[in-house]
Structure formats: structure tokens, C-alpha cells
Image: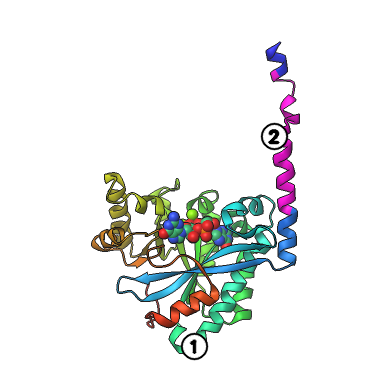
Amino acid sequence: QIKTRKSSGLCFFDPQMQVEIHQRVRMEEDLRVAMAQSQFELHYQPQFTLAGEVIGAEALLRWRHPERGLVPPGMFIAVAEESEIIVPLGMWVLRTACEQLARWQKDARLSQLQVSVNVSARQFRHKDFATRVVEVLRETGISPQRLKLELTESVVIENVEQAIATMKQLRALGLCFSMDDFGTGQSSLTYLTRLPLSQLKIDQSFIRNMGHRHTDDVIVQTIIGMARNLNLEVIAEGVETQEQRAMLASYGCAYFQGYLFSPPVPLHAFEQLLARVPVRMEPPGV
Ligand code: C2E
Ligand code: MG
Ligand code: MG
Ligand code: MG
């Protein structure tokens, strides 16, 4: 009888599921090995002003796998989050970015560069997060204004009060917060205004269809207008064409990131880029 078969728990032995569980466990093991063997690296994607000056970069995690080559975060971040490996891995990202900022800080021309670091929900909600960030700041000696933490709406939404408290604690030290993938989450505008944010980052899905889908043009204009009224910086991510750049500029977008300018690149390539483009030397606003 179909009914009893369905409720008999047969799916527990679903071979497809077995394979998935097995792969997941293997991936977790691989991630631990990768941490121990320093297989992770940061790539940097530059961020530009309208005038074409570099203001800094977003640090993006890559896994240099001995057999599989360069693995993008989409392939492993979810497993790292579910297994809590994201906590030490995320701290490695933060520390590495801060060590790099400390090196740039010694070079007058590069001393105002900012680096944005992505912080995942698990990592941000960990009870020691703020304490560990403070430790890294102290150990690397960077000025906190150089460091921007990118959160997504889902990070904040689960426990708004706690998120605000953690953000305020770090904001008081001078750190900045950016709302990544802005416009794609379920956040209400009411609490959004309560968060101590410095920047909204317009999600690339809206940028992609600009000029082709009227609603996306409206959304982008609305986000830019809202950012201006709330006195927040606004940056567009995933800018791929001159048309998109021009439209964003006409709407009043101040900062740009995307393949039109540069993909994320390894450190040495980013430093080569810094050597040939203008670099903003004024301290960041907001
Ligand atoms: P994200 O933070 O929204 O990063 C932007 C993603 O868009 C990056 O993908 C970047 O390479 C890609 N991108 C940049 N410009 C363009 C463009 O013009 N067109 C298109 N189509 N894509 C563009 P990536 O590096 O694969 O990272 C994917 C996501 O993985 C990130 O999204 C972020 O959520 C997560 N991630 C990356 N590094 C870290 C990390 O260190 N920690 C955590 N927790 N998450 C990370
Ligand atoms: Mg990001
Ligand atoms: Mg994003
Ligand atoms: Mg994203």
C-alpha cells in the first residue's frame, strides 16, 4: 500500500541522500584540513569613485585546493556555516585583511584604503565575535575606520536587538558596517533605520536588469534616494557595463564595484592595479 510505504521512513535510506550526507561530511573534513594547511587565500575586488579613484577593496575568500584548483566561496561557505568552521575561518579572513591593511597603512599613498570583509550569520552571532574583532584590531594596529564589515539582512533579522548591540559596540570603536545584497532580504525599513550602518550595497540582481526592467530601475533609484536621505554611503555591486555605470551615476550612486572595473584578483595583481590607477587619499567620509 502506497500510504504505509510513504510513511515508513524509507527515505532515510534514500541512496541519493546518503551520497549527499557523505559528500557533506567529506567537505567538512576537507575544510578542516584546508585550514590546517593554509589553503585559503583572499582575493581583492577594487571599489571606485565616480572619478575613477580606488577607495579600497572587498576581500573575497578563495580555497586553493591541491587537486580542484581555485574553489569559489559558493561551493563551500554553506557547509562552513553549518559546521561552525565559519567561526575560525571567518576570523582568519578578518585577521588576514587587517594584516594587509596594516601593511598599506605604512605606505602614505595607500594609507586611506578601506577593506570590506563579509561576515556570516553564525560568525556574527557568536558570543565572542566583538571581543575577537577588538583583539585583531589591537594586534594588527590598524585604524578601525579602514575596516568595513559587510552583513546581510538575514544576519540581522534573527535577533535585531542583539545585532544592534553588537554593531553599536564595534561602531563605537570606529568600524563601519555595510548592508550587503541590499534589497533582497526581508528586512523592514523601520528597523533598518535603527541599525548603525554606514553603507548600503545595492544587490547585483537589480543592477543586472537596469535599463531592461523598469521595476529594477525604480528599485535602484529608490535605494540611492533612501541612502542619501538617511545619510548613508551607497555602492553598487556587479557593475558590468558602461550603461549601468552611467545610469547609476545619473541616479547619484557614488561608489562602484564590478567586472567593468575589475574582477576580484589575488593580492599581487591588486597591488599592480593600485600602482597604475589613482588612489583616494582623503580619509573616508560618513
Ligand atoms: P558578495 O559578498 O555579495 O560578493 C559579491 C560576489 O559577486 C563575489 O562572488 C564577486 O566575485 C561577484 N562579483 C563581483 N563583481 C561582479 C560582476 O560584475 N558580475 C558578477 N556576475 N559577479 C560579480 P564570490 O567571490 O564568488 O563570493 C560569493 C559570496 O560568497 C559573497 O557574496 C559572500 O556572500 C560570500 N563570501 C565571499 N567571501 C566570504 C568570506 O570571507 N566570508 C563569508 N562569510 N562569506 C564570503
Ligand atoms: Mg559582500
Ligand atoms: Mg553582495
Ligand atoms: Mg551575495
**134 to the left or right of 58:** right
Label 2 near label 1: C-beta < 8 Å?
A: no
> What is the crowding at mark 2: few (fewer than 14 residues within 10 Å), some, or many (at least 20)?
few
Which region is colored magenta? 6-28
Q: In which quarter of the image is residue 72?
A: bottom right
Give the residue at the far left of this rendering.
250
Q: In which quarter of the image is the N terminus?
A: top right
Residue 22, compared with residue 232, is above or below; it is above
Residue 34, compared with residue 210, is above or below; it is below
Q: Is mark 2 on a helix, strand or loop?
A: helix
Q: Mark 2 belongs to which amino acid?
A: Gln
Cβ of disc 2 within 8 Å of ligand 1? no
Q: Mark 1 belongs to which amino acid?
A: Asp
Q: Nearer the viewer, residue 154 or 3?
A: 3
Mark pair 1, 2: CA separation? 54 Å
**9 to the left or right of 265:** right
Circle 1 is placed at which residue position?
107
Circle 2 is placed at which residue position?
16
Give the residue at the far top of this rendering.
1
Residue 211, compared with residue 268, is above or below; it is above
